């Protein structure tokens, strides 16, 4: 039968119209439909889910992870997120509740709700543990209409937890005596860390105890004696892989192992880790739980357990064999020797080298006739007298790059006569004065070397040069130029303020003091009145008056030190130089530099 084009076009329009109508009816009428969903809400919920599982859960902040997931679930409600997202949020909440030991029954219920929303979802293989997988399989049966299966047991019917570890808890222990915890793991996951989380009587929170590898499958550790008080000591076990994921558990916060702690002596052999001696009782300074007000850190005691094990210098294979709990390995050997334990805070750089610079601002003394030499007396046979400036404050004048007044340099008689002519032209008592005040001085560049005596005090030296020094010759001729110029040599002690300041990064103030040898030069412009060539008038002339002193100085100062890391620090401060020798001239100088520790 032949269909007309008009009839065919009509059918296509009718089909398209019917499809659009069906979509609108479904979108408007169906709960949880596309129109009911909110893309912004879903994006925010997924962001919370990512933070909960990829940040909080992986660093064992289980309560924070659960809070974020519950917030995301509330945001999504019944229809603001697609079904798959709502199901995955419920699934992850169950993982946190079970894997984090918050509440296994609630975790199992979360799994059931997740599968009811979307039965196609699966567990994240990276987050599986034996307990999580068992609860998931049980939830599958419950959500499919079968007989609901209870979550996997956390105890063997006696209140003792069960899980991925083989463990027999200590029967009893005497108070203020370390409680040994030893477990074995024979599962498929590769553990890199095992933690026992314990809580003694009077403690409000569980504390972590890092356990050490013992043999092929064992892990062990001792709960510190200060946390062992009369009552019950509770704990549970967690094992982590290389990604810091909890892949093995035994117990949780609600179902714990319990060890009775007694005041009197216990019966039987004192408990101890395999191959290790039993721990001895700590000194008792008062019977109070560790978190009670007034108790000292560690549960009221000050001593801690008496050290047990091998003495320093004896052969060892593991840290736990030594009294010092430190077995220093021999090169090319699995064995070692017991050695004194060095705390992390004691490992800090002792040798510090660096580079610094400073710029002096000198406080110049006032003086009159700073350029004039001693008056010339033709009958005076002590011609050396006429080589010295009239002022007593160490000033020497320079006219450009030449000494002023000019001095002859051939013989004593010629020098005397030349000096008489040049010096006589300087009019006494008129201008030629320094009123005092400040003037720029030397730029100093030096390297430093210090030894850290302890975590706050350094002693060392600075070696460098002083730049922008006096450029003339006559001060040296007269014996007034510091012999050390332009070198700078300084001995210094530096105290960095704050607890263990040299052993850690961060900001700390510091103070220092020292002494040394150097030159301290500064110049100031002065006006000199001269007689003219005819001797009938005067003229003004500007020259530089140089103050020189040294070679001796004392230094005091302080500033701030910022350690970028424990082996690198920037320092900035202010130094006060008290220089003396040719004259007494104080100066201040900002000082900046870097230090590197070894």
Image: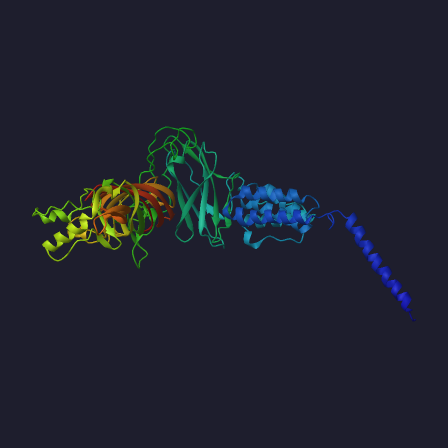
User: Which residue is more in the foreground, 137 or 375?
Assistant: 375
- Tell whether 89 sits left or right of 400: right
The image shows residue 505 at horizontal and vertical percentages of 38, 46
* Identity of the residue drawn at 86% across and 61% down: 13
In this rendering, the count of numbered labels is 0
Camera-side residue of 11 and 190 = 11
Figure quadrant of residue 557: top left
Q: Closer to the camera, 562 or 21? A: 562
- Observer-nearest residue: 92 or 513? 513
In the image, taking residue 423 as reference, residue 326 lies left or right, namely right
Is residue 242 found left or right of 407 in the rendered image?
right
Left or right of 194 on screen, residue 104: right
Residue 165 seen: yes
Q: Quadrant of the N terminus?
A: bottom right
- Tell me where residue 265 appears, x and y as whole percent: 36, 32
Q: Can residue 482 be spotted in the picture?
A: no
């Amino acid at each position: 039968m032949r269909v007309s084009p008009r009839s065919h076009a009509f059918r296509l329009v009718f089909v398209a119209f019917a499809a659009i109508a069906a979509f609108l009816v479904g979108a408007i009428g169906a709960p949880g439909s596309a129109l009911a969903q909110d893309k912004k809400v879903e994006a925010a919920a997924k962001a919370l889910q990512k933070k909960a599982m990829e940040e909080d859960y992986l660093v064992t902040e289980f309560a924070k992870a659960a809070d974020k997931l519950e917030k995301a679930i509330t945001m999504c409600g019944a229809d603001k997120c697609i079904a798959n997202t709502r199901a995955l949020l419920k699934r992850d909440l169950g993982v946190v509740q079970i894997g984090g030991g918050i509440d296994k029954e609630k975790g199992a219920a979360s799994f059931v709700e997740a599968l009811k929303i979307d039965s196609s979802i699966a567990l994240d293989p990276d987050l599986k543990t034996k307990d999580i997988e068992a609860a998931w399989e049980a939830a599958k049966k419950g959500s499919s209409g079968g007989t609901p299966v209870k979550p996997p047991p956390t105890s063997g019917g006696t209140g003792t937890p069960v899980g991925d570890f083989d463990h027999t808890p200590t029967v009893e222990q005497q108070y203020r005596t370390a409680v040994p915890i030893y477990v074995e793991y024979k599962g498929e996951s590769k553990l890199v860390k095992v933690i026992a989380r314990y809580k003694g009587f009077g403690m409000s929170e569980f504390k972590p105890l890092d356990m050490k590898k013992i043999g092929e499958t064992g892990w062990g550790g001792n709960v510190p004696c200060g946390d062992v008080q009369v009552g019950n000591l509770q704990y549970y076990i967690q094992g982590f892989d290389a990604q810091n994921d909890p892949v093995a558990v035994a117990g949780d916060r609600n179902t714990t192992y319990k060890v009775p702690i007694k005041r009197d002596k216990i019966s039987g052999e004192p408990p101890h880790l395999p191959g290790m001696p039993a721990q001895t009782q700590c000194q008792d300074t008062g019977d109070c739980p560790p978190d009670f007000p007034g108790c000292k850190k560690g549960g009221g005691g000050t001593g801690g357990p008496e050290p047990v094990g091998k003495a320093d210098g004896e052969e060892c294979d593991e840290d736990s064999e030594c009294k010092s709990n430190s077995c220093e390995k021999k090169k090319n050997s699995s064995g070692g020797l017991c050695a004194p334990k060095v705390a992390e805070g004691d490992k800090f750089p002792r040798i510090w080298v660096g580079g610094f610079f400073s710029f002096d601002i000198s406080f110049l003394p006032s003086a009159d006739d700073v350029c004039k030499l001693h008056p010339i007396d033709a009958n005076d046979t002590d011609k050396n007298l006429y080589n010295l400036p009239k002022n007593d404050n160490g000033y020497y004048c320079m006219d450009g790059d030449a000494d002023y007044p000019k001095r002859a340099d051939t013989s004593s008689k010629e020098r005397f006569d030349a000096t008489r002519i040049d010096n006589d032209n300087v009019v006494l008592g008129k201008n030629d004065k320094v009123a005092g005040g400040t003037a720029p001085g030397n730029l100093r560049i030096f390297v430093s070397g210090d030894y850290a005596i302890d975590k706050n005090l350094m002693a060392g030296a600075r070696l460098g040069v002083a730049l922008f020094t006096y450029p003339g010759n006559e001060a040296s001729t007269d014996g007034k130029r510091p012999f050390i110029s332009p070198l700078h040599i300084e001995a210094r002690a530096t105290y960095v303020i704050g607890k263990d300041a040299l052993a850690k990064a961060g900001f700390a103030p510091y103070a220092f003091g020292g002494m040394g040898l150097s030159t301290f030069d500064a110049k100031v412009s002065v006006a000199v009145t001269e007689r003219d060539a005819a001797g009938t008038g005067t003229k003004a002339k500007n020259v530089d008056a140089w103050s020189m002193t040294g070679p001796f100085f004392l230094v005091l100062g302080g500033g701030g030190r910022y350690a970028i890391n424990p082996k690198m620090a920037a320092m900035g401060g202010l130094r006060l130089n008290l220089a003396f020798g040719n004259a007494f001239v104080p100066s201040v100088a900002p000082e900046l530099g870097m230090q590197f520790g070894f």
